[in-house]
Amino acid sequence: MEGTQKSSTGLKVGLGILLVLFLVTAFYTSKLYSEKQENEKTLMNEKKQVMNDLSNMAKDYDEAIAESELKNQDLIAARERIQGLMDSLKISQNSVGSLWNYKKKYLALQEEMDVLLTENDRLKGENQYLASSLDSTQVQLAERTMFTDSLLVQNTQLATVVEDAAALQTVGLVGMGVIERNSGKQIPTERARRSDKIKVCFTVAKNMLAEAGDKELYVQVIDPKNNVLGSNEQIEFEDEVLNYSLISRFNYENRNLNICEYINELQDSKFEEGRYKINVFSDKALISSSEFTLK
C-alpha cells in the first residue's frame, strides 16, 4: 500500500514537471513567433520606403530627360539602372542583409543623380547663353537695318520721316515656360504642367531719333484656347479696343534695353498645352509678334 502511494506521488511530480516544461516551451515559442512577425513587418516597411525613394528618383530623371532638348545618354543610362534595381528589389527576399545591400546601392545612385542633374543644369545654362548671343546678333542686324532704312526715307516728307523713325521697335521677342526654385533660380521648360510662370523677353532697339524718358509697351499673351492671359485688361485707342496681359514700363535712354516680363499661372489651373502667341504693341501699333509651344 505504501509503495503504491509513493508511485502515485512520483507520477504526479513527473507530470507537473512536464507541464511546466510544456508551458515554458509554449511561452518562448510564442515570443519567438511574435518577434519574427514584428521583424518581417519592419523589413517590409523598410523595403517599401526604399522602393518609394527609388520611384521618386526615377521621376526626377524622367522630368530631366523630358526637359532636355537633346538626348542625354548619361541620364537615360542612370534611369535604366534605377529601373533594374527596382525590379530586383520587388522579387528580393526580406532579409536584413539584402535590404542593407539595396540601401547602399540607392545611396550610390543618389550621389550619381546629384552629379548628373547638376551637369544637366549647367548645360541648360550654356544653351541659354547661346540663345542670348543669337539674340544679340539679331539686335545688331536690326540696328543696321534701321540705319539703312533711315537713309532710304530721306527723300520722303520730313514729318513722315521723323514720325516713323522715332517710333520704338522691339527685336528678339521670345516666350517660354520657367520653373522657379525657392532660391529664385529660374529653369526654362517646355512642359506646361511644370511651368510656374511664362517669361516674355525682348529688346527695345537703340534709336537716337526716339525721345528719351519713361515709356510703356502693351504685351499680349494668348494661350492655345485663345484666352488673353495675365491681367486681361482693356484700353481704347479711338475706335479700337486692345486686351492686354500686362504693361511693360521702362525708362528709355536711346540705347538697347533688354526687358523680361512674367505672367503667373492661374490660381485654379495650370498652363494649357499647345501654341502660345505673343504680341507687343506701342499704343495701338503692333510692333512685334512671336510664338512658342508648351507640351
Image (cartoon, helix red, strand yellow):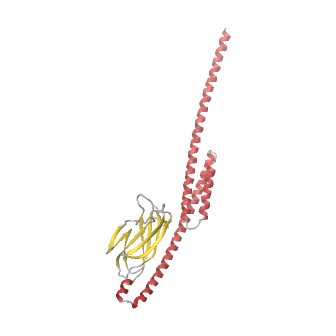
| On screen, residue 158 above or below 282 | below
Residue most toward the left?
Answer: 238
Foreground of the two, 260 or 5? 260
Residue most toward the bottom?
Answer: 155
Q: Is residue 117 visible?
A: no
| On screen, residue 164 above or below 182 | below
Quarter holding the N terminus is: top right
Foreground of the two, 125 or 261? 261
Q: Is residue 164 visible?
A: yes
Q: Position of residue 264 (x, y in %)?
A: 41, 63
Residue most toward the top?
Answer: 1
**Residue at image coords 59%, 60%:** 112
**Residue at image coords 58%, 37%:** 35
Foreground of the two, 113 or 81? 81
In which image quadrant can residue 106 be found? Answer: bottom right
Q: Position of residue 146 (x, y in %)?
A: 43, 84
**Residue at image coords 58%, 38%:** 37
Q: Position of residue 88 (x, y in %)?
A: 63, 51
**Residue at image coords 64%, 20%:** 15
Residue most toward the right?
Answer: 3
In which image quadrant can residue 73 be found? Answer: bottom right
Left or right of residue 190: residue 84: right
Q: In the rendered picture of this protein, how many numbered marks are placed on residues?
A: 0
In which image quadrant can residue 256 be found? Answer: bottom left
Left or right of residue 249: residue 143: right
Foreground of the two, 174 or 251? 174
Q: Position of residue 154 (x, y in %)?
A: 40, 90
